[in-house]
Image (cartoon, rainbow, N blue to C red):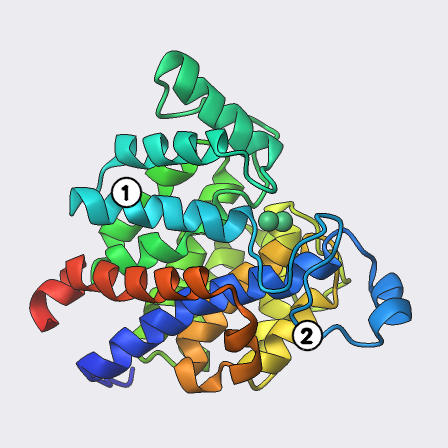
């Protein structure tokens, strides 16, 4: 295996790009959420602008639960300066009470159970294989950068606040690995290797002959993200491919955005998308990204 030691600045830039990519994918994809590819084609030909709208009637550049829950999680870690599951749960609860523009049913149930019973781990549930825990992996990947075991542990703990299913866990962990690998300069083959290991463990994630299902089920979500990640050559092309698949487009967009952002880097993110993103969101994701990496095991050695 090649050994490339990336510079400190490039790591911090890629971390910012990962978090920015998440918010951009969310803002871009929210427009086509729950549409079919043919409806998208009839309306936009190709959807490639951050215009808001969609079923949530968003303003251009507005983000949804995917970015908001990530920011709530990241803020809890920055406040505690360490892994703090109850702090995360408290921030999720405060966020839920703030009447967010959207909240998934499984997330709502988990947060309610925390509110009513103080429960920090929802019991295993057959129906918990939605992508609601996976969509908030960016801050976890940044905070645990440099220590995969810690990432795996934290990924499961944060996921189980709302979702407890082996396929959701495996998805969270694969996303965390891919984001971390890409931030540290991993190439396309190394990212693909992570998907092969996932498929070896759970064959259901196999994504060659992708059939276009882009629902919130973690298998459909990851197949959509992987298909477009590995069949395109830029951040822009990858995200446009994903959000034009419709379905859970804001979340597939957010997950593709965090991986492709980390992989292609800050300069590859189209300036017109960065400019359209709501300014407070843009500032908060970039600031959290740098601070989280500084608190990480990698940051302790390099910053
Ligand atoms: Mn959303
Ligand atoms: Mn969604």
Q: Quadrant of residue 263?
A: bottom left
Instruction: Left or right? Give the position of 271 relative to 85.
Output: right
- Determine whether 27 is above or below 261 in the image: above
In the image, what residue occupies the spot 49% across and 63% down?
22
In the image, what residue occupies the spot 39% across and 12% down?
117
Give the x, y percent position of residue 42: 91, 69
Furthest residue to the right?
A: 42
Residue 100 visible in the picture = yes
In the image, what residue occupies the spot 77% across and 62% down?
211
Q: Secondary structure at mark 2?
A: loop
Query: N-terminal of the two: label 1 or label 2?
Result: 2
Instruction: Report which residue position mark 2 lands on.
Output: 49
Residue 231 visible in the picture = no
Task: Check if mark 1's residue and mark 2's residue have beta carbons within 8 Å.
Answer: no
- Density class for disc 2 (Cα within 10 Å; few <14, some 14-19, many ≥20) is some
Residue 76 circle label: 1
């Amino acid at each position: 295996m090649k050994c490339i030691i990336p510079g400190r600045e490039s790591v911090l830039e890629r971390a910012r790009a990962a978090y920015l990519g998440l918010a951009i994918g969310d803002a871009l994809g929210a427009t086509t959420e729950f549409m079919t590819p043919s409806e998208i084609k009839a309306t936009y030909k190709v959807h490639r602008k951050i215009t808001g709208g969609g079923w949530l009637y968003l303003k251009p550049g507005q983000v949804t639960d995917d970015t908001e829950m990530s920011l709530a999680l990241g803020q809890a870690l920055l406040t505690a300066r360490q892994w703090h599951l109850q702090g995360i749960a408290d921030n999720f609860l405060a966020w839920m009470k703030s009447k967010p523009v959207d909240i998934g049913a499984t997330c709502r149930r988990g947060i309610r159970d925390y509110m009513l019973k103080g429960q920090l781990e929802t019991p295993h549930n057959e129906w918990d294989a939605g992508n609601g825990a996976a969509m908030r992996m960016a801050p976890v990947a940044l905070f645990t950068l440099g220590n995969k075991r810690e990432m795996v542990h934290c990924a499961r703990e944060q996921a189980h606040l709302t979702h407890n299913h082996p396929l959701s866990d495996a998805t969270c962990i694969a996303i965390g690995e891919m984001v971390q690998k890409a931030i540290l300069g991993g190439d396309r083959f190394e990212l693909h290797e992570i998907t092969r290991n996932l498929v070896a463990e759970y064959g259901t994630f196999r994504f060659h002959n992708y059939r276009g299902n882009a629902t919130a089920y973690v298998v459909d979500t990851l197949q959509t993200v992987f298909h477009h990640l590995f069949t395109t050559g830029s951040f822009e092309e990858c995200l446009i491919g994903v959000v034009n698949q419709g379905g859970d487009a804001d979340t597939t967009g957010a997950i593709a955005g965090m991986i492709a952002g980390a992989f292609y880097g800050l300069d590859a993110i189209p300036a017109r998308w960065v400019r359209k993103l709501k300014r407070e969101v843009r500032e908060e994701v970039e600031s959290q990204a740098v601070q989280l990496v500084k608190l990480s095991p990698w940051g302790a050695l390099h910053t």
